[in-house]
């Protein structure tokens, strides 16, 4: 399984507004691309950053599905988020592969 992870660091005062927006807009938009089968939203309890930190993880079974999202949808989806929360957050994203042991 592949995990596309978005880590958001947001202003404390923005947390509840951001959570509501992520749940009603961002997550449905990402899942609506068809690239991912499920997701998890995680709160980072011991973040060294100022503000609050969340990880949003989307799960897919092939790199092709992720690549389709990356090249066709990611920039537009992130542009909407950037417009909504301009200069009040930091975002970085990673692609990870689950390791079976």
Image: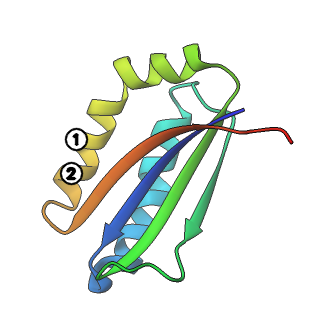
Q: Residue furthest left?
A: 87
Quarter that holds the N terminus:
top right
50 on left or right of 22:
left
Q: Secondary structure at mark 1?
A: helix
> In x, y percent, where is residue 10?
30, 72
Q: Residue at x 28, y 86 (%)?
A: 13
Q: Residue at x 42, y 51 (%)?
A: 25
Q: Residue at x 28, y 50 (%)?
A: 81
> In x, y percent, where is residue 66?
53, 24
Q: Where is 88 relative to 81, above or below? A: below
Image quadrant of residue 31? top right
Q: Secondary structure at mark 2?
A: helix
24 on left or right of 38:
left
Determine contact: label 1, label 2, CB under 8 Å: yes
Quarter that holds the C terminus:
top right
83 on left or right of 70:
left
> In x, y percent, where is residue 53?
42, 72
Q: Where is 58 relative to 25, above or below? A: above
> In x, y percent, where is residue 85?
21, 62
79 on left or right of 67:
left
Q: Residue at x 47, y 18 (%)?
A: 67
Q: CA distance from mark 1 to mark 2?
A: 5 Å
Q: Residue furthest front?
A: 101
Residue that numbered label 2 is attached to: 82
Residue that numbered label 1 is attached to: 79
Give the class, few, some or many, for how many residues have Cα within 10 Å of label 2's Cα (few <14, many ≥20). some
Q: Where is 84 relative to 97, above or below? A: below
Count of marks placed on residues:
2
């Amino acid at each position: 399984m592949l995990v596309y992870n978005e880590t958001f660091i947001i202003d404390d005062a923005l947390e509840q507004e951001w959570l509501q927006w992520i749940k009603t807009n961002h997550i449905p938009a990402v899942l609506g691309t068809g690239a991912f089968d499920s997701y998890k939203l995680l709160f980072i309890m011991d973040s060294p950053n100022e503000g609050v930190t969340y990880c949003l993880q989307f799960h897919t079974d092939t790199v092709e599905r992720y690549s389709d999202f990356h090249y066709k949808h990611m920039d537009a989806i992130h542009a909407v988020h950037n417009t909504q929360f301009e200069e009040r957050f930091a975002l970085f994203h990673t692609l990870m592969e689950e390791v079976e042991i």
